[in-house]
Amino acid sequence: MTSRSSKVTARPSSEARAVARTQTLIKGTAGIGTVRRTTLPGGLRIVTETLPSVRSATFGIWAHVGSRDETPSLNGATHYLEHLLFKGTTRRSALDISSALDAVGGEMNAFTAKEYTCYYARVLDTDLPLAIDVVCDMLTGSLILEEDVNVERGAILEEIAMTEDDPGDCVHDLFAHTMFGDNALGRPVLGTVDTVNALTADRIRRFYRKHYDPTHLVVACAGNIDHNKVVRQVRAAFEKAGALRDPDAQPIAPREGRRTIRTSGKVELLARKTEQAHVVLGMPGIARADDRRWAMGVLNTALGGGMSSRLFQEVREKRGLAYSVYSYTSAFADCGLFGVYAGCRPSQVHDVLRICRDELDHVAQNGLSDEEIARAIGQLRGSTVLGLEDTGALMNRIGKSELCWGEQMSVDDMLAKMEAVTPDEVREVARDILGQRPSLSVIGPLKDKQTSRLHDAVA
């Protein structure tokens, strides 16, 4: 490293500074891939995990934009744009995009969340250059033609209808609205029929230009790959599209959030002629970067994360009141949710809610046993490792880590964090989270007498 001299006055030119910066973040050992990051001039980050023992590779591009970044009138624009990037570029038609990956047996898809969007392709390692070229072309050269916007509008409206036909899925959107109200986190990722019908090609193009700048993107690739080759291919694709215009641009920092206000003790009911009642009982959780997230993961696993969990045993195994019952957490930049879901016959909904509420109250007041905590830690460690057994999962991990935290944690370090969780930490987070007044969302064919009693579940 060159020492700094106080006599140096000349500032290097932009061209001299326009070099890629590469770091090794995690040194690979037996069974663990080496993770490297390169930041290109223009602010584009590229992270890879190299696993020479596999024959596949997954390439993805993560965008620092989700439904949380939409105004009320733009609700659904992020997801709409996800669809449109598959419709054609200056170099490829929609058929060209899909047939290119089909011809090599590859898989290609995308997903939109509340705080990020991801586009990815999984291929044989020898076909990785093709996947890189196609996905980069989609992200940098999308046309977003008016005729494509109009055609895809119908497909998105069908997707909304499909979601609304699945109350077990729809109830989670309802619960987000129950907790967050009419703000960005409380609105559905897909948008609504009214907002999707109101979106125009011009508005979506402006949204695209604002949020798909290289400084807002993270490229992630995992599998039998060479980091330097991936960097060269990505850089060539972005430079060919003229996307790396400002050599001094810096990557956007991880999202800090907006201190979103959450509610407690609220009940929202949606009448539907369904065979089951679908319920979510929950309360505010913790933010993504909260140090208590490891203890929260253990608590969630012990409460409703498997067949030996408290809720599964009490609701399904002992009483047979529900086929599906589980707990879950959703963590965002500044806040989070903890929820318990159950699907049951409408006549059983009050019994199910009473049991769930009793279990949450009991754990809040008395905590979990040391045996339950040890079992949950073991389950969490095993499921974490088993969930990273394919290149797609590895790409998701390193891409999301870079975008949301700006850093990488090795699997060994993650397992050590889980193993280090103490019973006292789990009991403390149980008191903090489960001790809050819950809110409730229900979808089903409930009668007037039943609905009046549902407010008792959050009293």
Image (tube, rainbow, N blue to C red):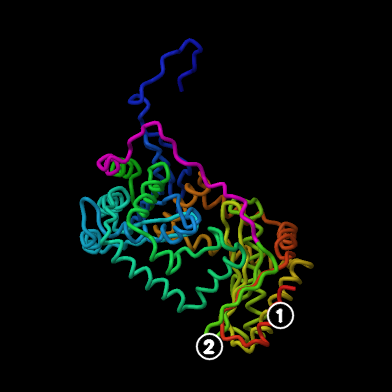
Magenta span main SS = loop
- How many numbered marks, from 0 up? 2
**Dot in front, 2 or 1:** 2
Q: Which residue is mark 1?
A: 354
Q: As drawn, is 142 to the left or to the right of 458?
A: left
Q: Is residue 365 visible?
A: yes
Q: Position of residue 167 (x, y in %)?
A: 51, 78
Residue 373 placement: quadrant: bottom right
Residue 448 against residue 260 in the figure, above or below: below
**Secondary structure at numbered mark 2:** loop
Q: Quadrant of the C terminus?
A: bottom right
Q: Position of residue 230 (x, y in %)?
A: 32, 45
Instruction: Answer few, some or many: residues within 10 Å of disc 2's Cα (few below 14, many 20 plus, some between 14 and 19).
Output: few
Furthest residue to the bottom?
Answer: 347
Instruction: Answer few, some or many: residues within 10 Å of disc 1's Cα (few below 14, many 20 plus, some between 14 and 19).
Output: some
Furthest residue to the top?
Answer: 7
Between the C-alphas of marks 2 and 1, the distance is 21 Å
Which segment is the magenta one?
A: 236-262
Q: Residue at x 33, y 70 (%)?
A: 154
Q: Residue at x 35, y 43 (%)?
A: 227
Residue 322 versus residue 153: which sits nearer the camera?
153
Residue kind at label 1, given as amino acid type: Arg
Q: Is residue 254 magenta?
A: yes
